[in-house]
Each structure stands twice: as structure tokens, then as C-alpha cells.
Amino acid sequence: MGDSMQRITYKGIKTHNLKNIDVDLYKGGMTCIAGVSGSGKSSLAFSTISGISQAEYDKMTNDNKVEINYDVDSYDDVIMAVPLKQLNFNVNPRSTVMSYFDLQKFVIYVVGSITGLPLSDFNYNGDGRCRECQGLGYKQQPDPVSIIDYDKKICEVPFRCWQKSYVDFFKQLLIAYCDECGIDSNKRFKELSEKQKEKLLYGTGDKKQTFKYKAGGRVRSKTSYYIGPITGLEKKTDDLFSHNREQYCAQKKCDCCNGSRLRAKTATKEMIKGFTVTNLYTEDLDTLEKDLKKLKKKAAKNLHPALENILSFITACQKVGLGYLNLTRSIASLSGGELQRLRIAQLLSGKMHDLLIVLDEPTASLYPAEVDIIIDIMEEMRKKNTLLVVEHNEKVIERSDHNIYLGHDGGKNGGYLISKAEFMKLQEGSLAYRFFKGFSHDTCILESDYVDYSGSELEIPKGSILGLCGTSGCGKTTILREILPKFYEDYLYVSQKPLKGNSFTTVATYTKLLDEIRIYFAEILGKDKGYFSQRGKGACDKCGGTGAVEIGSFYEETLFDTCDKCNGTGYLQKVLSWQVNGINIYDIQQMTVDELIASKLNMSAKANKILDFLSNLGLGYLMLSQKVKTLSGGEDQRIKLAEALNDNKYAMIGLDEPAKGLGRRETARLLGLIYDQVSTNKKTFIIAEHDTMFLDYCSYIAELIRKGQSTTIIFQGSREQLLNDKRNDIHKWLTTDVTEL
């Protein structure tokens, strides 16, 4: 980087775990922040650099009301920052691509002008909404796949939606109804005729039946008509059915509006021959671009600016690989990576320049072939802006003008500036495992109406690792999040969503470790466990356990200072005086996971198991008192994985890009733990992943592509078969010979 470029300087950065570091950015350049998970990359990029820009802006526009999350001595020549994280907290199904990115006014103006209808007719969140689906474009309908266990006999109660506490009652009710209808209750559901299946799913009994049944160790009595599970779910009234009805329903495109969210009479209006309002609202962007260009040729000149705005956004979306979306796609249904790329598209199509654009692993969640496209886009963006990128991808690091490396570890052992050589040393992963040469012959076939597999259905070998890969939008997350839970009761999906919790939730409280620690202290010291809670008997009587007291206000902001009675611990002094092996309840929470393991405190087997999982997942550096809101995305997912593995009821686990945010070393540790779970506990893992190291160690791989609205499996089989099958793309990026490292 030449000295001629103007610098943006930050000195004495001590945010979170950063160790009083000085960094420079260069205006008009691209700076990459690289480092191991938890080393402080997000603290530097988002909490500090982006946070400073936002604070300076807020000082001028918001009467100094700004929340400061950074700790820095000085900074100079900062510019306005646009932080683009890979997070999606939006849960509103009415928020769509069109409304979120302010395209709705252009769309409504175009369709209203051409059709001559009132503009309000095209507002699916107002008067123009379809009355059948209330403007959602879909309806929740009972889903047979979720409801029925097709392999169970009728007498074994094959309907999952009925309350499990009544299973003995249902068995008797089903057998009685089968006798009434002339159905053999010893047959499996899949062996019944279509007419018999319909009877059981939709039928109702002619008279009430009373049966004694066992529940909760007691004999009870219940009287009820037979009500088929689908009929019962549709009526939403019968207490026999599970309260979690949505689990047994699926989103089906509304037949009335055909997914457009508008009233049928509006949606079917033709704008040009063969192109209706429904087409405009529901076509994928790749198709829509072609149709809008045709429309522009015939539209009045006054509509051209609005059409250009829409087309400009569509072109930008195509550049970032999102041509498969449509204008009414719900924002809540997008991954964090998809939403980040939509925001990049907005920047590309917008008119603002000279910004500091802060990107959070923009190549994560991308197929290897898509990485080069995003790098080219970043090159385009920095022509008129300054880029700061948190990234692990070697190609991005190489293409950057300037790199900042953080290490040497995560948590309190991280936050140091290190050299490139030191960083490269940390990337050396070792994995004392071979990929599985074969896979289980016990294979289940995933049949689904929701993902349209052309040619074949997805095969899942039990007791193995299945790697799902493929281009963005091909349906990997849909399989993990929506389809597999409907088929398998012992399945758990571990998502990319941040951990749930409030501002007080810590690693210890989220993992339930603190509960075990409190019980341990109470038993050893002979005290009530309530004394070891900052929300219970042990809470400081001055600050109420928060460790801080209110000292006044500034404008509308309440100001706090450390409580002088408990010195910020939140505990009564007498509680702090109670110790086990020289450690009090506050001290133990300031320890890291690995330090607690090394302390040899003889806590419960449950606590030891949680600690071991966290350490084996490479999270030994985490302090027990660390707030979950400060954790990185990679740390979030690994904590959720530890939580899942600690519960033996799950035999099948779906992971959505577990290597995201991890370097080679952390990926190797994660793979090692997964291998142990497969080989020791016979668990099955279905993993959506693009990281080639991760895929190298999968025993079975399925590659998917999206064609229009359907998903095609272009390859599925063992890794050895993959390398010999030239029809697929992923073999280009895999290691040709994986040996024991």
C-alpha cells in the first residue's frame, strides 16, 4: 500500500478482547481483517471502526444519544460507514425484497399506470391484499408428510400430530374406527388403499367412544369421537391435537392469488400479452429482467425512470448471484448471507459513494465458483468507496491492498496484532482421521414435494456424514430447516441464527453451566443455592445483582457506574467470602472453559460433559461470564452444536455451514468431534457446506443445482465416486488424495 493514500487512523483499541492495538485503513483501498475465531475480528471491524463512524454521525443528528460499545484512545479522518453483517433478525413475513429495498413505489406506479386501477389495489399489506391468504402469498395447510409415519402400523398410532400423552387412548380409538370401516389395523399406513388412507386422515366417527388408558403412571378415562388428523388440524378445536400445530403444517402457495399476495382480479390483469401482474410479483429476477425489458419497449416514456430503477436493482442482484429470488420473497426467509448480498446489490445500484463499506465474510455461504464473482464485485465497489472486509478466504486476503492479522487465539488470549507468517502458522490444521471409505447400507430416501428433485430423490446414509453442496438458492437450507424435521422426530437442525438471550445472558447461563456450578457450591458449602445467584438471595442489596448503579442522566441517556458495595460483582460480600478450593462464585465465572477444566473441581457429570464439548469444539478460550451478544457467528453455532450433542435424543443432526467463520485449525477440531460422534454414538450428520476442507472429509456427498423453480441432484454418492464423476463441479475443488494428516 503506497504512502500516498490517505489514512484513517485508530489508536489504542481495547474493545472487548483487543489488546491496545493501533490500525490504519486506506481510503479507496480494500483492507482485510483475518484471524482465528474469537480473535477480535468483529470487535475491530464492527464494534470499533463501524461503531465510531456511527457514533460520530449520531452526535450530529441525534442529540448525542448514542450507545458506545468501543474502547479506543483516539481516531482521525474517519468516514461514514455502512456495516453489512451476515445476520438476519427479520421475522416479519410481510417484509419482502420489494418493500425492504424501497422498490414497491416504483412497481405500484408502473402497474397502476398500465392497468388503470387504483394504486391501493397493488398494496398487498393493505386494501389490495388477497383475502384468502391475507396478503402472505401462502396458507398454512396440514402436511401429510409431517403428520404420517408411513412405516408404522395403524395400531401403533402412525399420526405424529396427536398428543403423545394420549397414545394409549388413540390406539384403542384407531382400532375401533378401523373395525367400523373394515380396515385392517395391523397393516402399515403405506400398505392401505388410497380410499382407506382418506378415511383415516379425513373421516369422523359416528359415535363417541369411551376408553380407559394409561398416562403418567395412572389409569384415566376419556370419551371422544374419532376425528381424522387432517380434519382435526383444519378445525383447530380438538384438544387431542398437539398445541404446536405449525409443526404439522406446511406453507402452500395460495391458490386464489397464485402467490402474488394480491386479489385475484388484480393479479390476473395483463400488462402486455402473456405478462400479468402475477408474473411481475412472482417471477424469479432472471426471468423478470427479460419481461420488463419487453414491457419497457411498449410502455409510455413517463414509466421509463421507474422501470429503470427496478431493472437496475435486478441487474445488481444478478451480479451477486441472487437472480433466483423474486420481488415478493419474504425477507424473513433469507439467510444472513443472502440479505448481505442484497444490501451489496442495493449499494451497487445506488448513488452514494465515498463510503466505508464493512463486510462480514462476503464469500461465506458461496459455492467455490461464486467466490470469484464476489471478489470482482468488491473490486468494483472500491473504485468509489473504501472497503473493510472480515474474511478467511485466501483469495480475498491475497487480493486486498492491506491486511490486518489477529491472534494468537480466541477470547482473552486473542486480540493481538500478529504477522502474516504467524497467521499462516495458525492456519495449519491437523486431523487425525481419514474420511470414511464407505457408508452405512441403511439408507433412507427423502421424498419431498417441496424441493423438486429432477431424476432422483435424496439418499441419506445413516451413521455417516452427508455433505450437501451447490450454488446459492439450490435448496440446501430448505432441506435442513423445513423438510428433514417433517420426516424424523429424532432430528435437530442447528441453524446460523444468533443465540437467544437478553443483555445479561452469558456463556455460563446459556449452556446451563451456571446452574450446575450453583448446585455444586451449595452442596459443598452447605448453603441454599439461591445465594449463588445474582438474581436471588446472593444479589448485592445496593445494585440488585447488576454490578452497576444509576448515577444520573445525560439528555435522555441514563448513566451508570460500578457499584462500590460489590465492586461490580453483583454479589453480597458474605457470598464472595464463601470459597471452594480458594475460588468464590464470582471468580469461577471469570475463568475460561479450559481454566475451569484444569481446576479439577469435581462438579457434576453433566457439567463436565458440557465443558468437554465446548473445549473439543475449540471454544476453551471463552470466559464463562462472556455475554452471548458479543460472540461471533462461528462461536454461536458451535455452542448450539455442543448443546445438541449433549442431548442424546437426537440421532440425526443438520448443520448449516458449520465451517463458516473458521480457519483450517478450528475446522479440523470440529471435524474431529463430528467423527467421534459418528463412530462412537452412530449419529448421522447432514451438513450444508461449501468449505472444501470440510467436504473432503465427508463420507457421502450430494451436489445440487437450481434450474428455474426446481432443484436437481447432479451427483450423489461416496467421495471416491465423486472424484471419478466428471458431470459434477465440486470435484474440481476437492483434494485428489486425502491422507491422514
Image (cartoon, grey):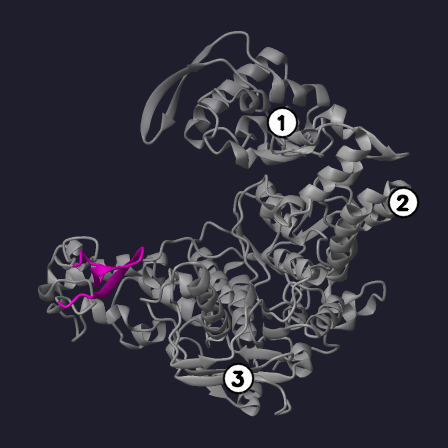
Residue 319 makes an appearance in the image: yes
Q: Is residue 28 left or right of residue 583?
A: right
From the image, which quarter does the N terminus lie in?
bottom right
Magenta-colored span: 543-564
Question: Which of the 4 image quarters holds residue 628?
Answer: bottom left
Tag 1: Cα neighbours inside 10 Å, few (<14), some, or many (≥20)?
Answer: some
Taking the magenta stretch, the answer to whether it contains residue 180 is no
User: In this orientation, which residue lies closer to the viewer: 135 or 116?
Assistant: 116
Q: Amino acid at mark 3?
A: Asp
State the image coordinates of residue 366 (x, y, percent, origin top left): 68, 64
Which label's residue is closer to the chain start, 3 or 2? Answer: 3
Residue at left 50%, top 88%? 418
Determine contact: label 1, label 2, CB under 8 Å. Answer: no
Question: Would you place residue 354 above or below residue 489 in this image?
Answer: below
How far apart in space, not on screen, are marks 3 and 2 (Cα)? 49 Å
Determine whether the residue tagged by mark 2 lies in a helix, strand or loop.
helix
Q: Which residue is mark 2?
A: 294
